[in-house]
Image (cartoon, rainbow, N blue to C red):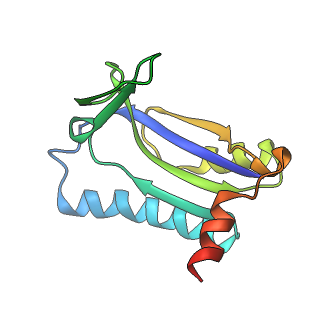
Amino acid sequence: MKYMLILAGEEGGMEDVSPEEMKAVMDRWSAYGQELVDAGAFIAGEGLQESATATTVRISDDGERLVTDGPFAETKEQVGGFYVIECADLDEAIEWARKVPLQGGGIEVRPVMDYTQYGYEDPSTATAEASS
């Protein structure tokens, strides 16, 4: 089963970090990513730029689309990255979430929609097959 690990925390705080300290931080993230790959659990993952770079499309009840700058919510915590992983169950996904080298913040563990239960093909499989 696929799960998304949604990484959220306060933005900033890395402005005064030395190049050596930043390398040490990035080395921990790289090691975590490699552990996911080696275990066959990694599907996708990326870090995100700060929320100030975001654009939000709001959809009204009548279907009108309104495009605005910035994140959809005014909170201190923002989504900073994500992983999509393949796990046997929620317990395994939680174990992977516990290993994420995030300092502060939190990790939301959420199952990815299983389209096959509704008679549809998994969109990620269909996209991969169509491009080969």
**Considering depth in this image, is 9 or 6 the residue closer to the camera?**
6
Above or below 69: residue 93:
below
Quarter of the view holding residue 24: bottom left
Residue 68 is situated, as x and y percent measured from the top left of the image, at 24, 28
Identity of the residue drawn at 61% across and 46% down: 4
Q: Residue at x 55, y 53 (%)?
A: 83
Q: Is residue 35 left or right of residue 120?
A: left
Q: Position of residue 89 (x, y in %)?
A: 82, 47
Residue 60 image offset from top left, x and y in percent: 41, 18
Q: Nearer the viewer, residue 111 or 16?
A: 111
Q: Horizontally, is 16 left or right of 116 in the view?
A: left
Dividing the picture into quarters, in which one does residue 112 lie?
top right
**Number of callouts in the render?**
0
Q: Quadrant of residue 57?
A: top left
Q: Residue furthest left?
A: 16
Q: Is residue 27 above or below residue 25?
A: below
Residue at horizontal 53 percent and vertical 64 percent from the top:
33
| Left or right relative to 80: residue 98 | right
Tell me what residue is drawn at x 32 percent, y 32 percent. 56
Residue in the foreground of this view, choosing between 88 and 119: 119
Whether residue 78 can be seen here: yes
**Does any portion of residue 101 appear in the rendered image?**
no
Q: Is residue 75 above or below residue 54?
A: above
Identify which residue, 9 or 18, lies in the foreground: 9
Q: Report x, y in % for residue 11.
A: 29, 35
Q: Quarter of the image containing the C terminus?
A: bottom right
